[in-house]
């Protein structure tokens, strides 16, 4: 494709056409409700340029960029006015970050360098004001480079499957606009049917994803593996791109084979925000043969290795016109020119005999545990056969392994001991429902480190309680409930806490907060942190519960009664009845308050299953071995069958599980209601 004809749609004087490469009648942008040709986009930008808040203001424009026409038009207009744009994640979750950024960089009088076009967060600077400074040359050169090796045409149609404030998602917008192609704006997930209806209706030819995107596709499809049914629904699909982290070689090979069957090419790519977006790509013809490689440098770029070792592994260094101007850590940096001529990527790599680059690890993921220097990236790669979901962080001489798979703790510890000399005492394995991820789909290193610290730090130190903050309580909820995505507005009830997790969490919260307020299970993390008692005076003050939760006391008493009765110490009737009362109490307290009929019903059914399934398996096993129970007991139909077959109810061995039968049918009745 030739890019010499870019800027074919003129803008009014005073506006730089910059990225607009389409003919006036070509469609530039599409969303759920409308579309704009390149001529209409130019008119919309001219109208937006008259907005005094945009044109008359100086300094950096802080823009939470949404996937809609209004947001993209504002962004492109600011670039056309040569006003630097700082892109942030939209939504309430990003509000604290946005406030911090605006505090640091929001001064309209701040001086900016004339070449400065764009400010983006790096994946490692989520909690700080550190930003990447990108020039107009950086942005345009990388957009053209990507359009070149993807062979983008004005007939191509891309869809925003990734956030636009993320450099990979933004590069999709830039490269397609500079090629005169169409970009469909969608904020739907790839797991949503609405995403695929929109992609089909608009004739999408290109799809971009991070490794997590392909995991979601595989998990969402019920008709087969590797996302085949969904991708096959796009008859015009011509290319699929993957970046944003390493994808396992077997998955690369599988996706490449899938592309061959369905007529599209898979481009595995490598990049960093510091290089605007892309530094390397793997030609599709090599994806099956060389799935461990990230490929060759993009057009206009080159690689070298810094201080390679005897195995040919060194830090990968990139040169090209897309290398950033430098970092910004305070407003004074905005006025500086380019600081760099090449980029030290921080990635350890080798360049194979065929010229392809292979990434083997990270400098900054090297940790010292038990006196051993460990490359966490290499350790994760070695664990892939045991657990492809495993992600590692090191905290205070302990290696923490986070996984979504059950029953992998033993094999993981044995592997790390046998292959890396780590004793079991230096390894902790945490099972979570989902790995916390950044908005770009990468494992959230900061959140995982916080979870690891929360799981190991004692609640007290030297008799003094550690400082209690909403964030420290959120970490406690995330670890004990196995919900790393827990937010500051979540509560025990909203996170799906049950009567079992209630005991441990209430005990830990009591050690941190002292007395727990009444109704704490429905209070948000932020509300609970604000209600912490700071003194021991007024212990029985109004509004505060007794030191022990009544549910915990009832459970302990019921278990005690059942145990002493069954070992024939003393006959105390009523233990099972008390357990029924505890079950009903927790149902009313934790499950019925859940908002939404569907969620509430699913929560009730889940509670039943957690009790009924393991008990059924145990009863069925005993029935097969001893013959003491009928099959009806294992499926909780003893009462109904006994009454009909025997003309009434009388005690048999099958009735030893009467309280389980009562719980199951009682909960089912509530769920049906």
Image (cartoon, grey):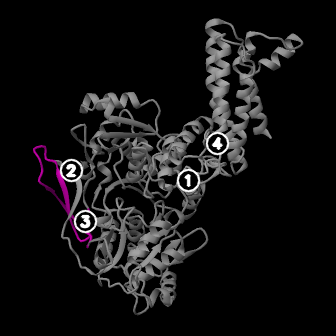
Residue position for label 3: 299
Label total for image: 4
Label 1 to label 4: alpha-carbon separation: 15 Å
Q: Is residue 534 left or right of residue 429?
A: right
Residue position for label 1: 532
Label 1 to label 2: alpha-carbon separation: 50 Å
Residue position for label 2: 349
Q: Which is more N-terminal, label 2 or label 4?
A: 2
Label 2 to label 3: alpha-carbon separation: 20 Å
Neighbour tally class for label 2: few under 14, some 14-19, many 20 plus, Cα within 10 Å: many
Q: Position of residue 308 (x, y in %)?
A: 12, 50
Asked whether residue 324 is drawn in magenta, I would say yes
Q: Nearer the viewer, mark 1 or mark 2?
A: 1
Q: Which is more N-terminal, label 1 or label 3?
A: 3
Residue position for label 4: 546
Residue at x-position 35% and y-position 33%: 385
Q: Position of residue 496 (x, y in %)?
A: 61, 44
In this orientation, which residue lies closer to the viewer: 570 or 19? 570
Is there CB contact under 8 Å for labels 2 and 3? no
Quarter holding residue 192 = bottom right
Q: Nearer the viewer, mark 3 or mark 4?
A: 4
């Amino acid at each position: 494709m030739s890019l010499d004809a870019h800027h074919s749609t003129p803008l009014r004087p005073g506006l730089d056409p910059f990225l607009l490469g389409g003919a006036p009648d070509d469609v530039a942008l599409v969303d759920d409700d409308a579309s704009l040709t390149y001529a209409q986009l130019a008119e919309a930008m001219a109208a937006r340029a008259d907005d005094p808040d945009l044109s008359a203001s100086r300094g950096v424009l802080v823009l939470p960029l949404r996937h809609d026409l209004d947001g993209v038009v504002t962004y492109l207009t600011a670039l056309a006015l040569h006003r630097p744009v700082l892109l942030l994640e939209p939504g309430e979750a990003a509000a604290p970050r946005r406030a911090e950024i605006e505090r640091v960089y929001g001064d309209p009088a701040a001086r900016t360098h004339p070449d400065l076009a764009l400010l983006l967060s790096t994946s490692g600077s989520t909690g700080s004001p550190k930003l990447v400074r990108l020039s107009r040359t950086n942005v345009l050169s990388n957009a053209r480079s990507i359009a070149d090796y993807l062979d983008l045409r004005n007939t191509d149609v891309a869809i925003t499957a990734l956030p636009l404030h993320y450099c990979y998602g933004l590069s999709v917008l830039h490269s397609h606009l500079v090629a005169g192609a169409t970009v469909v704006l969608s904020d739907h997930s790839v797991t949503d049917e609405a995403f695929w209806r929109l992609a089909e209706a608009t004739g999408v030819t290109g799809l971009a994803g991070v490794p997590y995107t392909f995991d979601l596709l595989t998990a969402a499809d019920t008709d087969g593996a590797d996302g085949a049914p969904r991708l096959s629904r796009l008859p015009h699909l011509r290319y699929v791109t993957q970046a944003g982290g390493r994808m396992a070689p077997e998955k690369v090979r599988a996706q490449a084979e899938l592309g061959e069957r369905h007529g599209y090419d898979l481009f595995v790519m490598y990049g960093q925000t510091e290089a605007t977006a892309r530094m390397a790509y793997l030609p599709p013809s090599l994806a099956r043969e060389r799935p461990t490689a990230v490929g060759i440098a993009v057009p206009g770029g080159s690689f070298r290795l810094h201080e390679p070792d005897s195995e040919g592994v060194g830090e990968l260094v990139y040169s090209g016109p897309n290398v950033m101007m430098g970092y910004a850590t305070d407003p004074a940096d905005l006025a500086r020119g380019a600081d760099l001529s090449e980029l030290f990527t921080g990635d350890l790599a080798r360049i194979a005999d065929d010229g392809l680059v292979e990434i083997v690890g990270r400098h900054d993921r090297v940790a010292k545990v038990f006196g051993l220097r460990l490359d966490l990236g290499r350790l994760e790669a070695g664990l892939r056969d045991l657990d492809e979901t495993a992600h590692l962080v090191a905290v205070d001489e302990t290696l923490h392994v986070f996984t979504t798979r059950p029953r992998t703790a033993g094999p993981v510890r044995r592997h790390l001991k046998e292959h890396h000399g780590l004793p079991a005492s230096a390894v902790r394995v945490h099972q979570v429902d989902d790995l916390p991820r950044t908005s770009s789909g990468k494992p959230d290193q900061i959140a995982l480190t916080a979870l690891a610290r929360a799981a190991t730090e004692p609640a007290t130190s030297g008799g003094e309680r550690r400082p209690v903050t909403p964030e420290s309580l959120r970490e406690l909820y995330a670890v004990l409930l196995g919900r790393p995505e827990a937010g500051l507005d979540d509560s025990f009830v909203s996170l799906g806490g049950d009567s079992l997790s209630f005991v441990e969490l209430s005990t830990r919260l009591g050690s941190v907060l002292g007395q727990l307020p009444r109704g704490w299970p429905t209070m948000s993390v932020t509300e609970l942190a604000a209600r912490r008692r700071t003194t021991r005076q007024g212990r029985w003050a109004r509004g505060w519960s007794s030191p022990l939760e009544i549910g915990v006391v009832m459970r302990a008493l019921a278990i005690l009664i059942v145990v002493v009765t069954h070992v024939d110490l003393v006959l105390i009737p009523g233990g099972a009845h008390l357990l029924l009362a505890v079950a009903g109490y927790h149902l009313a307290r934790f499950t019925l308050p859940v908002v939404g009929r569907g969620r509430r019903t699913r929560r009730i059914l889940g509670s039943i299953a957690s009790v009924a399934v393991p008990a059924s398996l145990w009863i069925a096993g005993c029935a097969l071995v001893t013959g003491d129970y009928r099959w009806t007991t294992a499926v909780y139909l003893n009462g109904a069958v006994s009454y009909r077959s025997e003309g009434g109810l009388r005690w048999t061995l099958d009735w030893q599980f009467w309280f389980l039968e009562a719980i199951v049918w009682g909960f089912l009745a509530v769920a049906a209601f």
